[in-house]
Image (tube, helix red, strand yellow):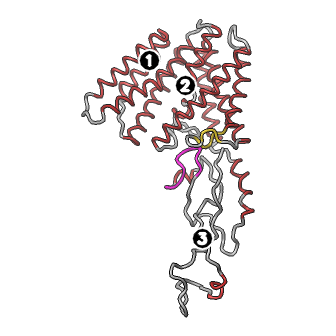
Amino acid sequence: MNDSSWGAPPQAGYWGPSDQGPVQGAAPAGPAYDAHNAQQTRPMPIVPDVPAHGGDQDDERGAASTGGPLFRDETPSHRAPSQHQPKPQEPMSSASQPASAPQKKKNAGRDLGAAIGVGVALGAVIVVSLFVVKAVFVGVIVVAVVVGLWELTSRLQERKSIKAPLVPLALGGAAMVVAGYVRGAEGAWVAMALTALAVLVWRMTEPPEGYLKDVTAGVFAAFYIPFLATFVAMMLTADDGAWRVLTFLALAVVSDTGAYAIGWRFGTHKLAPRISPGKTREGLLGAVAFAMVAGALFMQFLIEDGTWWQGLLMGFAVAVTATLGDLGESMIKRDLGIKDMGTLLPGHGGIMDRLDSLLPTAPVVWLLLVIFVGSG
């Protein structure tokens, strides 16, 4: 899932011929100049500096430096000339470059220990709240929505000077999730409309400069985060709602795991290099295969009246929508020029970096479940 290096590293110690050429009888300035060696040296073109080792998408050194990568799936394109330079007496040969390729592919690209620990903790909170009291899980959705809105609006203001009003978004987002749980799709749409109206009115208390972009971003945020999350609350209202939500979450996680495992091991063909260079077509196939198998098992054994072939279709749909959701947030982050939406979850980034694949998947899974087994 790493990008390949470009070109070959320059030979250290060579700075190219002088623009004016050697002067007869005078040695050029510089330490330890050998006139005999200078006459035997042929002029060579200067080769631009490239990394002497394979940078990875989560390399903290690259992310911390000015020229380092901004994104988890991006390889640094430039490093200081003084780093990792071969010694003058031992020039790097072209044969040594391919040997570094397997090392780049083997690097997982993130802190797996922290990511697994945080993932297990989040999973425990979700499962306990989901199967103990449904209303508690609705509260978990509300907290995730409010934190996600805070992350998105903060990054918009920091990077683009867009002031999407957080207060009406947070209040309206919470109301949207609760309305979806209590009144279904009709309640969610009404809450969405009222939230959009509140954003327009709230922004009127400030100067008119930037009003259009601020309210546009606010309405987008209201639809993107709380409205899509409302479909998770709507799944919960069914008699087997806890199992439906568990199936939805598990398929999204399995899809992401399949894409990560297969793409890291076999990925060579880029899926969308201009959006997310780390994603590969092989990773997408892995996501589809893993999700379809998991979908068949979950629908057959966990969902009442569900069958395995319905799970195959659902798994395929989850893999596609989860990938599109991930690419969509990658587009937003590239436009903002940031690596992650936040730092709240070690090894993952922010809440939005975990919700990116879940949000567009929720309405698709809800709809397929209603079609396959009904809404009750």
**Residue at 26 percent of width and 32 percent of height:** 206
Q: Amino acid at mark 2?
A: Pro
Identify which residue, 142 or 191, lies in the foreground.
191
Question: Are discs 2 and 3 less than 8 Å apart at CB?
Answer: no
Label 1: which secondary element = helix
Res 45 label:
3
First in sequence: mark 2 or mark 3?
A: 3
Q: Amino acid at mark 1?
A: Met
How crowded is the residue under tag 2: few (<14 C-alpha within 10 Å), some, or many (20+)? Answer: many
Q: Residues within 10 Å of mark 3 (few under 14, many from 20)?
A: few
Residue at position x 41%, y 34% from top? 153
N-terminal-most mark, 1 or 3 = 3
User: Which residue ends up furthest to the bottom in the rendered image?
Assistant: 25
Range of the magenta residues?
Answer: 66-75
Do labels 1 and 3 touch, CB within 8 Å?
Answer: no
Measure how far apart labels 1 and 2 are at the Cα level. Answer: 16 Å
Name the spot of residue 214 as percent of width and height, x first. Answer: 34, 32
Question: Label for residue 176?
Answer: 1
Helix, strand or loop at disc 3? Answer: loop
Of 8 and 243, the residue lying toward us: 8
> In the rendered image, which residue does mark 2 sit on?
360
- Label 2 secondary element: helix
**Magenta segment includes 74:** yes
